[in-house]
Amino acid sequence: MLSDKLKPGIRERIAELRKMAVRTVMVTGDNPITAYSIAAEAGVDDFVAEVTPEEKLQLVRREQAQGRLVAMTGDGTNDAPALAQADVGLAMNSGTMAAKEAANLVDLDSDPTKLTDLVAIGRQMLMTRGALTTFSIANDVAKYFAIIPAMFILALPGLAALNVMNLATPRSAVLSALIFNAVIIPLLIPLGWAACVSGCGRRKVCFIATFGFTASAG
């Protein structure tokens, strides 16, 4: 007799995703009774049974229309349209070529339990980008108000109004910019980090899975 057994580690990973404020939805072509049983055992937040490829695509679009960032994993050709539509599409290396071409990422190990690592790495990259962007903007503002007016104040007296730091020479402007960077960088990086953490918390995330919960067993 064939039955569906939950793959090791799936329930624990789903719980970790929930702690990260990620809503999980299992999408399957199985009948509702089988889908309910698997979903309950896996601990997902929601499930959709007996879906067609078109319905998978509509599901992704509906979640996006509600302002959610949608990640999806799949391995079949019928998953390709939804994988392409999702903000982040993750295909399994064991899946079809159509699924892998439509996705943004391919899991070479075909291990769905690594999904939490993917979410964590993505958020870390976003935090790093935010910190670097914050520093870059502050650095450009410092150059605008310190170096440029002082360097060209003799040739363009009208720039005196922008010389808010009252720098008299280009040398003093360069020195002040160096001191500014040395002081402000340690302060801006935590500020950018905190801003990104806050931004991640406000954006709702939905993870749609069509592969990896069960393995057939005799």
Image (cartoon, rainbow, N blue to C red):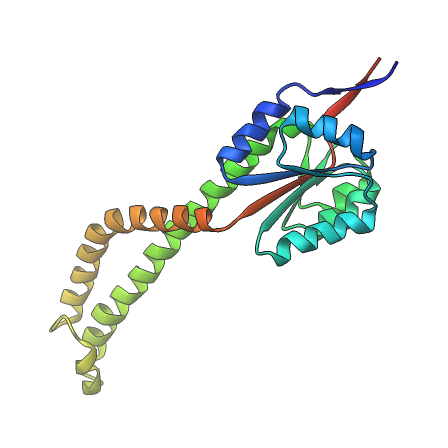
User: In the displayed structure, would residue 153 be above or below residue 11?
Assistant: below
Query: Is residue 148 visible to the viewer in this orientation of the structure?
Result: yes
Q: Quadrant of the C terminus?
A: top right
Residue under the image location 49 percent in, 33 percent down:
19
Q: Nearer the viewer, residue 121 or 155?
A: 121
User: In the displayed structure, would residue 161 be above or below residue 127?
Assistant: below
Residue under the image location 23 percent in, 71 percent down:
145
Residue under the image location 67 percent in, 46 percent down:
104
Task: Say whether residue 158 is left or right of residue 37.
Answer: left
Residue 209 location, quadrant = top right
Task: Say whether residue 55 is left or right of residue 141.
Answer: right
User: In the displayed structure, would residue 58 be above or below residue 38?
Assistant: below
Q: Nearer the viewer, residue 89 or 38?
A: 38
Give the percent coordinates (x, y) of residue 123: 48, 42
Task: Say whether residue 217 is left or right of residue 139.
Answer: right
Residue under the image location 82 percent in, 40 percent down:
50
Residue 119 location, quadrant = top right
